[in-house]
Image: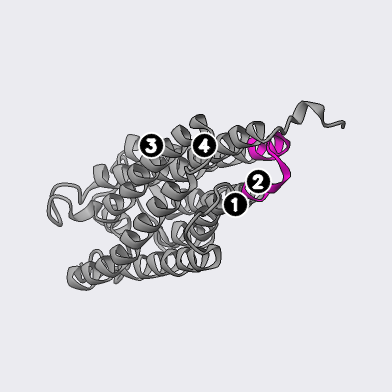
Amino acid sequence: MEILGNATFENYIGLENGYSEMAYQMVAHILTLGYAVMLAALLYFVLTIKYVAPRFRLSSVLSVVVMVSAFLLLYVQAGNWTSSFVFDQERGRYFLGEGQDLFNNGYRYLNWLIDVPMLLFQILFVVSLTKSNFSSVRNQFWFSGTGMIVTGYIGQYYEVTDFMVFAVWGAISTIFFIHILWLMKKVIDEGKEGIPVAAQNTLNSIWILFLISWMLYPGAYLMPHLAGIEGGFFNETGVVARQLTYTIADVSSKVIYGILLTVVAQHISRHEGYDYTQIKG
């Protein structure tokens, strides 16, 4: 297990057993789907920005930034996958190529380092805080969001070589994660005060989506250890499952979340008398 040092388990599978055609192509297609959805959502957020009152538009702008960041870094990661593994005709499988760059989930972490604070900030430009201080909540979101990603980034390098170090960094990341969940619930509960029922219901949906989609990330992080190292998901099935889980979580927590926030802003905008159809040009 020391041949590749602190490489993630995707590389060890590619070195030792290789990937079947199906597993290799499934990961390639999952990664491609991920950045394609981000590009499509980018167009959606650009085209719908006028549908909400001006005071809510910063949320849409942040969605645009998130989509651009996600598209670019997921595009690079998709290329990283296809360039890391080479088809061996004799064995009929894809193996880690000699002299090739190792596959690295770090691209996702770089993307999250940019996107997570912005995703958390977004809701603050849609709802009104009735009890909490805006700056305090924003700073807490930034601190815990950044802390969660950085500690998780460090931990993932030890998922094969040192489970204890991997678990410790994962536990530290989880502390930040729990704080984010608590703070988001607080923001949503305050944000529901004094807004239309339809907007309140959508905020409830956002909380459920947020809770479920963000819970997928720890599962993907732990994927190679869910049923014991070198058993269970420490194989190509685990690799496909991890990339699928990450992609579902990314699409849910960025695209669907952003769309629902736009819906909340539209409900409140209409309630306040804003009608985008009356805008000329």
Q: Look at label 2 and name its amino acid.
A: Phe
Q: Which residue is mark 2?
A: 56
Kindly tell me whether residue 24 is visible in this rendering.
no
User: Does the magenta segment cover residue 32?
Assistant: no
The image quarter in which residue 182 lies: bottom left
Give whichever of discs 2 and 3 has the lower sequence position.
3
Give whichever of discs 4 and 2 has the lower sequence position.
2
Q: Is residue 280 left or right of residue 188?
A: right
Along the viewing direction, whichever of 281 and 45 lies nearer the viewer? 281
Kindly tell me whether residue 150 is visible in this rendering.
yes
Residue at horizontal 65%, vertical 46%?
56
Q: Which residue is mark 1?
A: 125
Q: Count neighbours of disc 2 (C-alpha within 10 A) and say few if under 14, some if 14 to 19, many if 20 or more.
A: many
Q: Count neighbours of disc 3 (C-alpha within 10 A) and say few if under 14, some if 14 to 19, many if 20 or more.
A: some
Give whichever of discs 3 and 1 has the lower sequence position.
3
Residue range highlighted in magenta: 43-59
